[in-house]
Amino acid sequence: MKKLTRATRAVLGVCVLVSTAHAQSFPIYRQDNVLVGANFNDGPGSSDMTLIMRIDSNLDDEVAWVDEGHEVKFIVNPDNDGIEEGWTQIVYDDSEWDDGQAGVGFSDGDDNTVTAGGLISIWTRYYFDIQDAATVTNLTFRVEYDDQFAAWLNGVLISSSADVGGKFGEDEEPAWDLTMDPAGPNHGSKELPAGEPNLDRWADGGQESVELDFDYAGQTALSVDPQGKLTTTWSHLRATQ
């Protein structure tokens, strides 16, 4: 049998997609949560680009489930032609995407994974667990970016910068080659050095953040196969291969 990896597990489950238009809260699981980010440049000639995302319950305790340095699957424009729809959802086969560490970008010196310059877009998928979920009472999403972004948590849109938000509906995915109006808003990152999580990046409150209204949706983000042919949790599958 082919060895199972975190990157290929998405083809094993059946996921009920959540419409962001009617979502009252974000589904959070103890295992296999998926944070997805889209980073857009103002245009192919723009000089820099970055997207750094963080999910924590309290900035003061320095504990984060996603932050810079986190393992990430990523793909960049123009190399993402022909990618199938559904890339923002939990169930998606990103095994052909590249492996890196967040953030992913170029030219500012604040990225752990440095790409070629002049890109239009960079697409990222992060997997994370919250094993002590029962003790977590609040979650905050924080983002540092240049120039524009959108982010999804377990298939639900969390937030997007102003100029991106008008480019697609709440239950839609943006186009791969989305470019910004040069006259529109442009956000510049702090350009702090790349490396391990850096609380200075968030400490002054100057970057964007969203308090997440969430519900625990179960042990794993992967659903049980309706025919009963798959083991119920990815952790069991992973342990037995």
Image: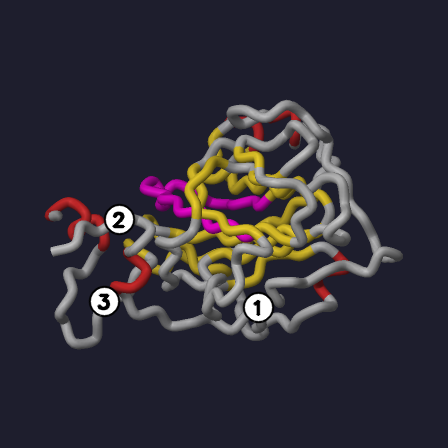
Q: Residue at x 72, y 39 (%)?
A: 48
Q: Residue at x 38, y 41 (%)?
A: 135
The amino acid marked with disc number 3 is Val
Is residue 218 in sight in this rendering? Answer: no
Q: Which residue is mark 2?
A: 5
Cα gap from disc 3 to disc 1, whole angstroms:
25 Å
Is residue 168 in sight in this rendering? Answer: yes
Range of the magenta residues? 123-141
Cα gap from disc 2 to disc 1, whole angstroms:
25 Å
Q: From what the image shows, is residue 97 above or below residue 105?
A: below
The amino acid marked with disc number 2 is Thr
Q: Which residue is mark 3?
A: 224
Quadrant in the rendering for residue 134: top left
Q: Residue at x 72, y 36 (%)?
A: 189
The amino acid marked with disc number 1 is Glu
Q: From what the image shows, is residue 13 above or below residue 133?
A: below
**Dot 3: element:** loop
**Left or right, 147 with reference to 53:** right
Of residue 95 and residue 44, the one placed in the foreground of this image is: 44
Based on the picture, tell me whether residue 33 belongs to the magenta stretch: no
